[in-house]
Image (cartoon, rainbow, N blue to C red):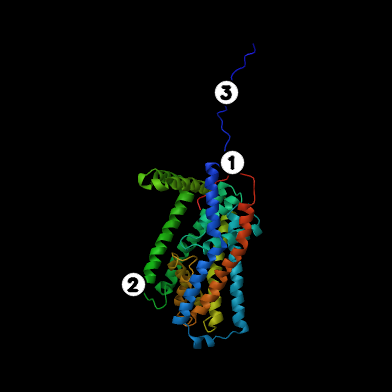
Amino acid sequence: MNHQKPIKPNTKQTPLLTTEGDQEANAREQKFIKTMRPSRIILPVLIGIFVVVYLFWAQFDLEKFREIRWTAAAFGWITLAFILLIFRHLFYTLRLHAITGGAFSFVKCIQLMVLWEFSAALTPTNKGGPAVMLFVLTKEKLSAGRTVAAVFYAMLADTGFFSIMLPVMLLIYGPSMLYPGVTSFQASGFAGGTFLVTYSMMATYFVTLVFFMFIRPRYAGQLLQWLSKRSLLKRWSEKIAHTGRDFLLAAEETRRQPARVHIAAVTGTIGAWFCKFAMINCLMIAVVPSIPFDGTTQAFIYARLVAMFIIMAFSPTPGGAGFAEVALSNFISDYVPIGIGLVVALLWRGMAYYGYLIVGALVVPGWISKKLIAPSPSANYPTPNV
C-alpha cells in the first residue's frame, strides 16, 4: 500500500488585499485629499471678503484714495513686487532642490513648492504645510531619510532666519520697529508682549533643533522614546515614537550633506524671506511715492514687516486670512495713511496669498489624480502622519 504523508496545512496565510497598514495608508490619503481639496479655499476667501468689507466701512478714506496716482511708475513698482514674488518661489525651489539631494528636477520642485504653499494657505499659520509635505514627498518616492530631513531642515532654516535676524534688527532700530509710535518695550503693549512670547518660542525651537540635529541627535531619539512610554502620553505614544525615529533619520541625513547643500539651503531661505517682505516695500512706494527711497528708511520698513510676521505668526485663520490684512494696515500706518493702507494690503494678499490659492486649486487635482487615484506599484515607503 502506498502510504502518503499527510499534507500539513499551510500556516503562512496569504495577506489580504487590504492589510491594516494599507487601511492606515488609505486613511491618510483620504485625509490628505480632504485637507487639500480646492473647495477649502472658500473659507479663507469668505473670511478675507468679510474683513475687507469691514475695513472699507471702518477705515477707507475715499479722499486719500483719490490722491493715489496710478502712473507708469506706480505700475512699475507693482510689477517689481510681482517679480519679487516669483523670485521668492524660485528661492524656495532652490532650497527644496538642495535639501532633497537633487532627487527632483528644478521644474518638479517648482510644482512641489506650489503644493507646499497651497497647503500652508489652507491651514492656520501656526500649522503651515510641513506635515502635508511629508506626505507629498513620500508619495513622490523620496527615501525616508531625505523626506524627513527635507521637512525638518526647512523648518530649521525658517526659524533660524528669524531667530538670528530679529535680535540684529532690534539692536539697530530698537523697539520702534515693533509698531508705529512705540518708543520702549514697556510702551509696546500687546504687540510687544506678543512679539516677545512668539520670538522666545521660535528661538527656543531653533536652538533645540540645532542641538538635537547637529550636536546630540541620539538624545532626541532617547527623549522621545522615553516620552512615548509615559502613561500620561499613552494616547500619543505611537506618534511620539514615530517622530523620534523620523528625527534620527533626519539628523543622520542632514549631518552628512556636503557644504554646498547647506549653502544652497541658507541662500534659498534668505532670498525667499527677503523677497517676501521687500515686495511689500514696493507696493507701499507704488501707493505712496513720497515714502523716502533711501536705504535706511526701506531697511527700517523691512524690519517692521519682519516683526509684524512674528507677531501674527499664530493667526487662527487659514493662511492668516483677514488677520494679515488688518495687521498690515496698522503696522505701516506711519508711512501709509490708515485710510488707504487697505489698498497695499489687498495688492499684497492678492498676489502672495490668493494667487497661491488659485494656482494651487489648478495644480493639486492633477497631482492627486496622478499620485493617489491612478494605480501605481506598491513600495515600502513610510507614510508620515498628516
> Is any atom of residue 281 visible in this view?
no
The amino acid on which the numbered mark 1 sits, given as a three-letter code, is: Leu
Residue carrying label 2: 186
Q: Going from the N terminus, do you reach mark 1 or mark 3 first?
A: 3
Q: 35 or 171, which lies in front?
A: 35
Q: Residues within 10 Å of mark 3 (few under 14, many from 20)?
A: few
Q: Secondary structure at mark 3?
A: loop
> Is any atom of residue 37 visible in this view?
yes
Q: Which mark is residue 369?
A: none
Q: Residue 93, image x and y in percent?
A: 60, 60
Q: Seen from this angle, which residue lies furthest top? A: 1
Q: Residue at x 55, y 41 (%)?
A: 19
Q: Residue 84, image x and y in percent?
A: 59, 70
Q: Which mark is residue 8?
A: 3
Q: Which quarter of the rendered picture does the N terminus lie within?
A: top right
Q: 281 or 350, which lies in front?
A: 350
Q: Which mark is residue 17?
A: 1
The answer to whether residue 29 is left or right of residue 187 is right
Asked if 327 appears above or below 257 in the picture, the reply is below
Q: Residue 247, image x and y in percent?
A: 49, 48
The amino acid on which the numbered mark 2 sits, given as a three-letter code, is: Gln
Q: CA distance from mark 1 to mark 3?
A: 25 Å
Q: CA distance from mark 2 to mark 3?
A: 82 Å
